[in-house]
Amino acid sequence: MSRKEKFSDYLIDVSKFVLTGVVITSLFQDVEDKVYIYWIGMFVAFATLWGGILLTEKKRRNNMGMYLAGLFVGVPCMLFIIYCYTPKGKEWRRQNNLL
């Protein structure tokens, strides 16, 4: 495995860790500006994922569609879960008998 491939794998892993760290940190700690943390975290995650995808070889790049599909499905799902724990989200769940 070349350095370029290892670096691309590293960037993809960093993307996953940043995304997970942002979500977990904001859920368990009392952070005042969660919106800014989410935007910065998502930007860093997308940037490192995009960099990792660009550095992969073309034959491996076809499999990167799975990463993107997971990202486009997983991120909205995580954002919805996070929204459900906000005061507005809790009120929405109470109104719709989901709580």
Image (spheres, rainbow, N blue to C red):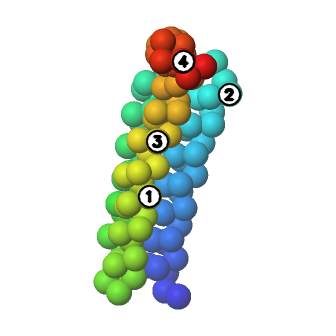
8 relative to 18 in the view: left or right: left
Mark 1: amino acid: Gly
Which residue, given by chain and number where applicable, does mark 2 sit on?
Answer: 28
**Mark 4, secondary structure of its residue:** loop
Q: How many marks?
A: 4
Residue marked by disc 3: 77
Name the residue type under label 2.
Phe
Vertical comparison of 42 with 94: above or below:
below
Question: In this rendering, which labeled residue sits more in front, label 2 or label 4?
Answer: 4
If you read the primary sequence from the N terminus, does the residue marked by circle 1 or circle 3 appear first? 1
Amino acid type assigned to the residue bearing label 4 in the image = Asn
Report x, y in % for residue 91. Answer: 50, 11
Count neighbours of disc 1 (C-alpha within 10 A) and say few if under 14, some if 14 to 19, many if 20 or more. Answer: few
Q: Are marks 2 and 4 in contact (CB under 8 Å)?
A: no
Residue plotted at (35% across, 77% down): 61
Precedes in sequence: disc 2 or disc 4: 2
Q: Residue 70's mark?
A: 1
Q: Residue at x 53, y 54 (%)?
A: 16
- Closer to the eye: label 3 or 4: 4
Query: What residue would you read off at disc 4?
Result: 97
